[in-house]
Amino acid sequence: MSDARKAINRRFFLSSAALAGATLAAPAVFAQTPDAGIVAHEESANTNMRRNISSFRELDWRPYFSNTVNGAILVDTVSRALHFWSEDQTIYKLYPTSVPVSEDLTRRGRTEVIRKVNGPTWSPTPAMKARNPDWPDFVPAGPDNPLGTRALYLSWQYYRIHGTHDTRKIGRKSSNGCIGLYNQHIEELFDLAKVGTQVVLI
């Protein structure tokens, strides 16, 4: 394969592999891919896909959590924002996010952080590989990795809160199910969150 063709295939993979995600009915169908490229670059033609960074607002934790033990993360998929409260409630953070491209890829409810990974790697699920045989079996940590520089693994299989090297995705419907943040924001959240931090998606 020529170098030019390899570069084109690499760009195609990076633009179409996206935020890890799955449906409730078939969680194994989608994997840890950070971006649903099918819409990532078509937003100008669809007002529902436009950036939404300026429309979110500060929220109080009490309507969503009974306490803030181990900290609390609330992801609002409508306003495309992630809220974090520290256990002692002295720290509050509000970050713009990417969200799933469609309702059937959007999972809501209660989960928690079960693992923290600095420099995550990425691999497609068998179902993804079957649909996209040209995709690599493994992408190491680094600037080509769809999960960015950090990842918080949730108790829901294949779901992550993670960074992205493609900043165009933030504030948009651009994922296959996961929640994406700017790398500088996931790095900050990574240091604040713990294994056991409560997570609610609404």
Image (cartoon, grey):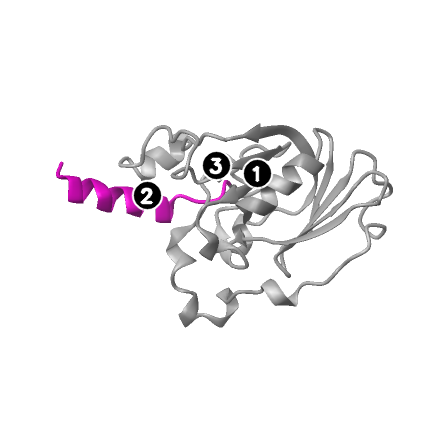
Circle 1: residue type: Arg
Q: Is residue 178 visible?
A: no
- The residue wearing badge 1 is 160
Q: Is residue 195 visible?
A: yes
- The circle on residue 13 is 2
The extreme left residue here reads: 2
Percent position of residue 174, x then y: 47, 54
Circle 2: residue type: Phe
- The residue wearing badge 3 is 32
Q: CA distance from mark 3 to mark 2?
A: 13 Å
Percent position of residue 171, x then y: 55, 59
Upstream in the sequence, badge 3 or badge 2? 2
The residue located at (53%, 49%) in the rendering is: 105
The residue located at (81%, 50%) in the rendering is: 61
The stretch in magenta equals 1-20
Percent position of residue 199, x then y: 71, 41
Of residues 44 and 128, the one nearer the viewer is 44
- Callout 2 secondary element: helix
Q: Residues within 10 Å of mark 1 (few under 14, many from 20)?
A: many
In this rendering, would 21 be left or right of 61? left
Upstream in the sequence, badge 2 or badge 1? 2
